[in-house]
Image (tube, rainbow, N blue to C red):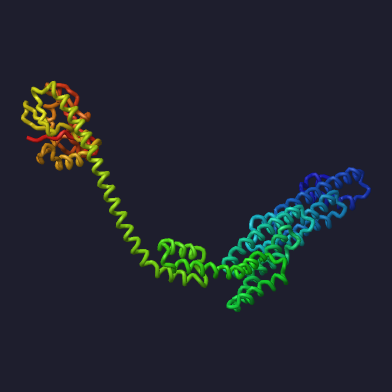
């Protein structure tokens, strides 16, 4: 008994207790020992169960997972055939397939095959391998989504086949789809597309057949009529009927050409109307058996039209030139009237200061005080607009007011004698004037300007050459 108490290993305790009971069947402590033995056995069973569950949880969920987990569970049941954990073990064994199926499902969702058929094969293989999986409905739904996406891809591919007028590859793709997904809702769309593609291919073959007898309109027309009798439900019926209509309208087209050619060749008609008639014909029939003849006739009539156009252009040019001359004369007269009014107004304003400023009567005014002659009107009054400094310089260089051509920009002091010395010059059309004094300040060129405010204090002011101002021209 003392040895049993000393032993701390459960397995060793059980072995010793069994050995002791076998060696001392009549021991007075037998009942107590058997109770201890049963408790130790239950504890060891619990320990082995928990270890088995832990070992299974540590397994990698891969293709070997099922066999490894099953081996661990069956080893436990072999050791404890009547285990109180037998039900849990059996449930765990049943869940191995479900766990494996869930793992495969997650892997399939994360890395599905790129090719539609390969993806379908993977989904179907999953259903075959895990028929009772909890993810079965999800896989079924994914197959339905795959069918929709596959059908969309085929429809997109069909557009490319239409561009190339070659439908065999698209028809083959439809067949591939229907070979495995015929029971899906998207299959009806693919069936309809396949029927349309087949009809387009047949139409291409039909056009080739009709082209071989194109010289005989009736034979070519009958090729299409015979096809409609055999295939009245074709999806390309409208296209076939359009081909038939082309033959039916050929006679009408010829009659129209004959009428157009007769009008275009009639020299009694206006040349523009004759060519216009040909152009309308070509606009509606720029290709076909009569287009070349129409272009040739139009080319033949073009020299005659050019001669008429030249005569008309000369007459129009003369009319326009006359109209421009009249408009310019009217503009100049209007400008002269405006300047006369402004000069008359300025002359009236000079009367109160006539002792200093003399109106020369020719658009100039003489300053008796300084001996300078000024333009009676500034540039803004003359032109009706302001101007930048460079433009102002060019303007002054072109002035011939009063019959003089030596006008210039005044300096700041000269302008100041008009507006900063009494009696002040009375008339002004601007708030300030450019001077001849230009210089660099920082990165910009600036110019001294003089304001027209009548005052006896003169403060130098400068502005950028890019400002818009006015000029009061001066000469000696």
* Left-right relation of 431 to 302: left
Using the image as rendered, state which of residue 100 and residue 139 is in the foreground. 139
Give the residue at x 67% y 60%: 151
Q: Quadrant of residue 453?
A: top left
| Residue 226 visible at all | yes
Using the image as rendered, state which of residue 33 and residue 100 is in the foreground. 100
On-image quarter of the C terminus: top left
Above or below: residue 38 compared with residue 63: above
Across the whole image, how many numbered discs are drawn on residues?
Answer: 0
Q: Quadrant of residue 391?
A: top left
On-image quarter of the N terminus: top right
* Left-right relation of 455 to 179: left
User: x, y (%) of residue 43?
Assistant: 81, 46
User: x, y (%) of residue 333?
Assistant: 22, 39
Above or below: residue 409 compared with residue 107: above
* Left-right relation of 345 to 139: left
Q: Quadrant of residue 379?
A: top left
| Residue 458 visible at all | no
User: x, y (%) of residue 148?
Assistant: 68, 57
Q: Residue furthest front?
A: 268
Above or below: residue 256 compared with residue 347: below
User: x, y (%) of residue 66?
Assistant: 75, 59
Q: Residue furthest right?
A: 26
Give the residue at x 13% y 40%: 400
Using the image as rendered, state which of residue 283 and residue 97 is in the foreground. 283
Give the residue at x 17% y 23%: 454
């Amino acid at each position: 008994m003392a040895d049993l108490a000393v032993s701390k290993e459960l397995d060793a305790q059980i072995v010793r207790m069994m050995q002791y009971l076998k060696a001392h069947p009549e021991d007075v402590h037998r009942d107590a020992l058997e109770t201890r033995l049963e408790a130790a056995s239950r504890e060891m069973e619990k320990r082995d169960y928990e270890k088995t569950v832990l070992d299974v949880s540590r397994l990698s969920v891969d293709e070997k997972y099922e066999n490894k987990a099953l081996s661990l569970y069956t080893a436990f049941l072999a050791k404890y055939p009547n285990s109180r954990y037998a039900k849990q073990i059996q449930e765990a064994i049943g869940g191995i397939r479900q766990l494996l199926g869930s793992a495969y499902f997650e892997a399939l969702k994360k890395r599905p095959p790129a090719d539609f058929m390969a993806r379908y094969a993977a989904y179907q293989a999953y259903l075959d391998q895990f028929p009772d999986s909890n993810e079965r409905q999800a896989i079924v739904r994914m197959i339905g989504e795959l069918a929709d996406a596959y059908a969309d891809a085929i429809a997109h591919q069909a557009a490319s086949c239409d561009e190339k007028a070659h439908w065999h590859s698209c028809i083959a793709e439809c067949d591939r789809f229907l070979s495995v997904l015929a029971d899906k809702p998207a299959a009806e769309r693919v069936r309809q597309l396949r029927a349309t593609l087949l009809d387009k291919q047949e139409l291409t073959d039909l056009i080739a057949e009709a082209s071989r007898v194109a010289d005989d309109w009736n034979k070519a027309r009958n090729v299409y009529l015979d096809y409609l009798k055999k295939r009245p439900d074709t999806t390309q019926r409208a296209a076939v009927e359009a081909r038939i209509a082309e033959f039916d309208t050929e006679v009408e087209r010829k009659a129209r050409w004959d009428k157009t050619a007769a009008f275009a060749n009639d020299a009694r008609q206006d040349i523009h109307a004759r060519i216009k008639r040909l152009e309308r014909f070509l606009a509606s029939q720029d290709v076909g058996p009569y287009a070349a003849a129409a272009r040739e006739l139009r080319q033949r009539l073009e020299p005659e039209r050019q001669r008429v156009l030249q005569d008309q252009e000369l007459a129009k040019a003369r009319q326009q030139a006359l109209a421009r001359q009249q408009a310019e004369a009217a503009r100049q007269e209007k400008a002269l009237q405006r300047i006369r009014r402004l000069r008359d107004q300025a002359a009236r304003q000079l009367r109160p200061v006539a002792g200093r400023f003399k109106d020369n009567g020719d658009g100039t005014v003489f300053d008796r005080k300084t001996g300078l002659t000024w333009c009676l009107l500034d540039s803004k009054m003359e032109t009706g607009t302001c101007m930048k400094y460079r433009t102002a310089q060019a303007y002054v260089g072109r002035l011939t007011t009063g019959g003089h051509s030596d006008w210039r920009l005044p300096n700041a002091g000269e302008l100041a004698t008009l507006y900063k010395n009494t009696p002040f010059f009375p008339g002004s059309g601007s708030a300030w004037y450019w001077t001849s004094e230009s210089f660099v300040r920082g990165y910009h060129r600036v110019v001294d300007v003089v304001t027209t405010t009548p005052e006896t204090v003169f403060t130098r002011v400068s502005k950028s050459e890019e400002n818009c101002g006015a000029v009061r021209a001066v000469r000696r």
